[in-house]
Amino acid sequence: MATPAVADTAAIRRRTTQTGDIVARLITLAFAASIILITFLLVWQLWSQSAATRHKFGFSFLFTTTWNPVTEEFGALPFVYGTVVTSVLALLISVPLGLGSAIFLSELAPAGISNALTFLIELLAAIPSVIYGLLALFALVPLMRDYGEPFLKSTLGFLPWFKGPVYGFGLLTGGMVLSIMTIPFIISVSREALLAVPREQREAALALGATRWESTWQIVVPYAKLGILGSIFLGLARALGETMAVTMVIGNDPKISASLFAPGYSIAAVIANEFSEATGQVYQSALIELGLVLFLLTIIINGLARLMIVATTRKGSKR
Amino acid sequence: MKLKRMSLAVAGLMAVAAPFAVAQQINAAGASFPAVIYQKWFEEYRKLHTDVQINYQSIGSGGGIAQLTSGTVDFGASDVPMTDEQISKLAVKPLHFPSVLGGVVPTYNVAGVTQDLKFAPETLSGIFLGTITKWNDPRLAKDNPGVKFPNADIQVVHRSDGSGTTFVWTDYLSKVSPDWKSKVGAGASVNWPVGLGQKGNEGVAGTVKQTPNSIGYVELIYAVQNKMAYGSVKNASGNFVKADFNTVTDAAAGAAKNIPDDFRVSITNAAGKNAYPISTFTWLLIPSHIPDAAKAKTIKAFLQWMLADGQKYAAGLSYASLPKEVIAKEVKQIAKIQ
């Protein structure tokens, strides 16, 4: 009688699986499936409720710049522009600041200071966005109108982004508010990612003769790249969907302008402002179609993020 | 033992809550502009009739009409009269009952100007169209002799959210400016040629207060309560009238002769020596047939009270009361509720 050299795993699984395991598996499967179901329902609702405008305008909705509720002509372009510009601006400001702070807190600061500051930064992440909006409205806008924007205009006024009249409200202030809101996310997640880098990496770099900075910038940060990228996309996701803080300072004017001082409008802001009083089938479905556009925008950006992560991982594993 | 204690506690709570159970609950929702006086009225009415509780949700005029259409509320409220299209969607024809009056005023913050400014209709439409861009424009100087305007750009502020206030303002501008009517038109939300958008009367009022050389439009109440400078507007008779409770009521009285039977009328640019040209009714939307006889009786009684004693509360809360001609007509309409 020959005993099999390889254990019969299927038989072992059959013998050791109990009813409890099966039930647990079904329940957790149900929870996971419900998330997917909710997402599908969301997309289906967005798609079906925006039918009126999709049939009326078709693809031209994405490229029209008019937003006229009286004549019922609607177009998404100014809102997509405003959303993208404020989010990119927010990232341009918050990524260097956030990453720099995360590096300081994980590598360079003494443990006591690092923990205290991290606690404060995590508190910042918990503040409701309306509070940031109020802060921006009463503190940031006058500051930008009286000092910040005139300063930029006088020094960088030759660039098309810093031309034109100064209002205080506008795309630049909107971007700044968003950057204040995304920085805590970037700092806390990047710091975790940097702390997770094994000590051996740093020690090896130092043993090979690298300076403290070279070891941090060339060894530790690239090792934590995935986590840092993740934090940036988390911040970006918040920036794209942020409503109240943006609508208080962006100026709420559906126009596209090269100047960052000009007022603009974002998708979330227009939906929050106009949905409750939107009368008429076409008007309501135009706002819902804007929601669909934002959803697609988020998917595209997250898709690109995934691709980037896959690309860098493949490159990393080939090293 | 634990179960016994818990059930005793629940029974105790229910005994305490029992006196708060009301005989009749009526739900209403709609415009936010008159919300303050409606809440006051419903509270005062409850003191007189302890078995009646009317709940009001201030979700906006559009919301009020939508809830009335879907049948989730017993009656609605709106700053904008319902259109024929909206009325056709209702199974039961709604009756419009004007409840109070409001006015919309131009509020401004001009460096160095402490006097009240006077605005002609052409000036207001020019400013909001973007054709008049500077405070020291000769058209402004013409109506305001002796006022030293700065050589500064006019910063226009308007509403970013849809609202009855915007509807009244744009309705007035459409009446006095053919240019405005063709380029922009009237609506709760419009395609503004110029200006920054802010949310709510508070947003516009706050922004105008903070931004030098700006102009915006707010409900009279906000300007009064926030002690903001607001200008007088030239009315159809050629007089510069500053909005207050009397001039707004005068506008309604002036329009009362020509008021249609269903009360769906705009009273902007009304005739009358002292009529304030940018005034509006705000309406309660009552279904003409209420199946629940007890509710119908209560609502009719409330309307009678509102048109009589209710109007006394208006001035204290900065609303203008209805003129007696309109009240007389409305009392007759109450009989139409079955």
Image: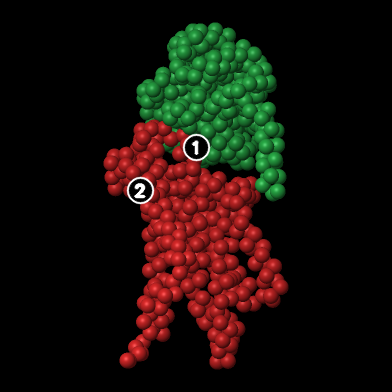
Residue located 41% across and 19% down the image: B93
Q: Is residue B134 above or below residue A155?
A: above
Question: Height in image: B27 above or below A294?
Answer: above
Q: Which residue is mark 1?
A: B161
Q: How many badges with numbers are in the image? A: 2
Quadrant hosting residue B36 = top right
Question: Pointer 2: residues within 10 angstroms few (<14), some, or many (20+)?
Answer: few
Q: Residue at x 35, y 48 (%)?
A: A44
Evaluate whether residue B130 shows in this view.
no
Q: State the hue of chain A.
A: red
CA distance for labels 1 and 2 = 27 Å
Same chain for mark 1 and mark 2? The answer is: no
Name the residue located 63 percent from the left edge and 21 percent from the top edge: B51
Q: Which residue is mark 2?
A: A44
Q: Secondary structure at mark 2?
A: helix
Pick the residue in front: B229 or B50: B50
Q: Position of residue B94 (x, y in %)?
A: 44, 19
| Residue in the foreground of this view, choosing between B40 and B299 | B299
Residue type for callout 2: Trp
Residue B43 position by quadrant: top right
Q: Which mark is residue A228?
A: none
Horizontally, residue B96 falls left or right of residue A150, namely: left
Side (left or right) of B2 relative to A161? right
Between A142 and B79, the one nearer to me in the picture = B79
Q: Chain of mark 2?
A: A
- Residue type marked 1: Asp
Q: Position of residue A213 (x, y in %)?
A: 58, 81
Residue B264 pos. (x, y %): 45, 17
Rendered location of residue A176, percent (x, y): 55, 56
Chain letter for the part of the structure drawn in green: B
